[in-house]
Image (cartoon, grey):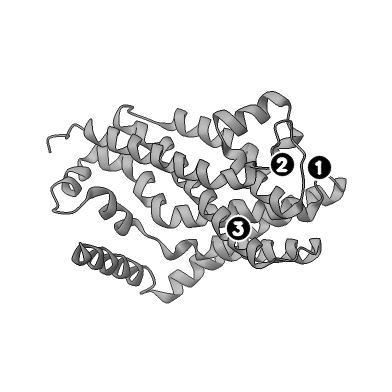
Amino acid sequence: MLDYIKLYLDFSKIKLKTQIESRLSFFILIICKIVGFGATGIMLWVMVDKFDFIGEWNPYEILLLFSFNMITYAIAGCFFYDFFVQLPKRIRTGELDEVLIKPLNPTTYLICRGVSAGYLGNVTVGLIAFFISVANLHIIFSLKDILMLILLIFGSSLIQCSVFSFSYTPSFWLISNNGVRNIIGDLKSFSDYPIAIYNKVIQFLLTFMFPFGFISFYPSQYFLNKSDGAFFNTSFPILTILVGLTLAFAGYKFWIFGLSHYQSTGN
């Protein structure tokens, strides 16, 4: 077992070293991501600042939401973006056959093969937004808060991972999964803002049916001591961890179910 773990870790290291071998290209990629996502964060802050508040949330509180979204997406994307985004192509071309005949677990193999250091740019933007918002909101972290922050980021990242699975696994049955991906993406985009600003139907959907509110809204409420939202409960921020584990498990099972129904192209 330890030999397999070492093998996977070594494989991941080789993948990362390959990506940063061309330092100039890697540096340009990181800078482009920092500039692109940084501009998104600035535009969001400027828009909210112009109106002072969106609902009961001020610009720096919105920036905290943005940082949660950015950091957790980067963590999930680092391991699962290539894994799932390339899945439709691998199914169409039969490249997935090559993966399945290797004497390795296909899930772990694809994670190690797709691990990407490029998300360092996303993390950088997320951390900058986080520290700016925390400093201006005068949030003081106790040891308990730091541990809670780590757990909430972990739970939110698992939700982001599950989004990749539910968006791309339908490729096993659909020629094009753009429709499914767009629907999930559109629903997830609601979490870019405090879900309390939407009507009760949307809040219900984003809390109980498609729990994207647990990516950033409910975790942020914990540190901001907010209680807005039609379905707010003091346990919701902590439930982020349980929601993340549940969705990640469901996403994994969905992927395994799709993989078990894979039919080779015959090439």
Say if mark 3 contacts mark 1, CB within 8 Å.
no
Q: Can residue 253 be seen in this view?
A: yes
Image check: 147 left or right of 179? right
Q: Where is residue 176 in the image (x, y as percent from the top left)?
A: 37, 30
Q: Residues within 10 Å of mark 2 (few under 14, many from 20)?
A: many
Q: Is mark 3 on a helix, strand or loop?
A: helix
Q: Where is residue 69 in the image (x, y as percent from the top left)?
A: 60, 51
Q: Position of residue 136 (x, y in %)?
A: 80, 64
Name the image quarter holding the N terminus.
bottom left
Mark seen at residue 148: 3
Say if mark 2 contacts mark 1, CB within 8 Å.
yes
Image check: 33 left or right of 135? left
Q: Does 146 sit above or below residue 246?
A: below
Of discs 2 and 3, which sits in the foreground? 3
Image check: 230 left or right of 144? right
Amino acid at the residue labelled 2: Pro
Q: For residue 208, what is the image quadrant?
A: top right
Alpha carbon separation for disc pair 3 and 1: 26 Å
> Circle 1 sits on which residue?
54
Seen at 25% across and 54% down, the residue is: 109
Mark seen at residue 194: 2
Pick whichever of labels 3 and 1 is earlier in the sequence.
1
Pick whichever of labels 2 and 3 is earlier in the sequence.
3
Q: Is residue 215 visible?
A: no
Q: 222 or 161, which lies in front? A: 222
Q: What element carries label 2?
A: loop
Pick whichever of labels 2 and 1 is earlier in the sequence.
1
Name the image quarter holding the C terminus.
top left
Q: Residues within 10 Å of mark 3 (few under 14, many from 20)?
A: some
Most extreme residue toward the top is 201
Q: Does 4 sit above or below residue 102?
A: below
Alpha carbon separation for disc pair 2 and 3: 20 Å
